[in-house]
Every structure is written in structure tokens, then in C-alpha cells.
Image (cartoon, helix red, strand yellow):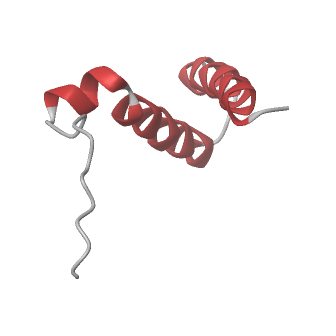
């Protein structure tokens, strides 16, 4: 299982947790972790990184 596949699995679990939290089937702490995870995943998207100006390639300059 590669990293992207694992992220997709956790994303699916995250959405299920959101739905469960909204219908009061899960404790509030699970909802908080889900909100944090979803926020992190949204922040990692190329679109958000572009909006924040962080999509540019970094140039590493070594001192000689």
C-alpha cells in the first residue's frame, strides 16, 4: 500500500467520522480529530498552496 492509497483510505474514514459525528454517534473528540485531519488535507492541496504562494519550487543555494 503506497502513501497516496493510505491517505485516500484515511480520507474515507474521515468523511465517515464527520457523518457519524453530525448524527451524534461518535464522541466529540473524534469529531475534533476529523476536523483537524480534513483541514490538514485541504491545506496540502495544490490549489491552497498556490493561493498561499507556496507552490513555487525552492532553490537550495550552498555556500562555497
Occupied quadrant, residue 21: top right
Figure label count = 0
The residue drawn where x is 60% and y is 17% is 19
- Nearest the viewer among 64 and 32 is 64
- On screen, residue 46 versus residue 64, left or right, reads right
Residue at 70 percent across and 36 percent down: it is 3
**64 lies above or below 23:** below
Residue at (55, 45) in percent of width and height: 33
Q: Residue 22, how many percent across, how many down?
A: 54, 21
Up/down of 20 relative to 52, above or below = above
Left or right, 11 with reference to 35: right
Q: Residue at x 15, y 27 (%)?
A: 51
Q: Quadrant of residue 14?
A: top right
Nearer to us in this view, 2 or 34: 2
Query: x, y percentage for residue 8?
Result: 67, 23
> Residue 39 appears at what percent x and percent y?
40, 36
Where residue 64 appears, as percent x and y from the top left, is: 22, 82
The quarter of the picture where the N terminus appears is top right
Q: Nearer the viewer, residue 27 or 47?
A: 47
Amino acid at each position: 500500500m503506497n502513501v497516496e492509497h493510505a491517505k485516500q483510505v484515511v480520507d474515507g474514514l474521515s468523511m465517515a467520522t464527520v457523518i457519524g459525528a453530525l448524527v451524534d454517534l461518535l464522541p466529540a473528540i473524534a469529531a475534533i480529530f476529523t476536523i483537524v485531519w480534513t483541514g490538514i488535507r485541504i491545506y496540502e492541496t495544490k490549489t491552497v498552496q498556490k493561493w498561499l504562494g507556496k507552490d513555487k519550487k525552492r532553490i537550495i543555494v550552498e555556500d562555497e
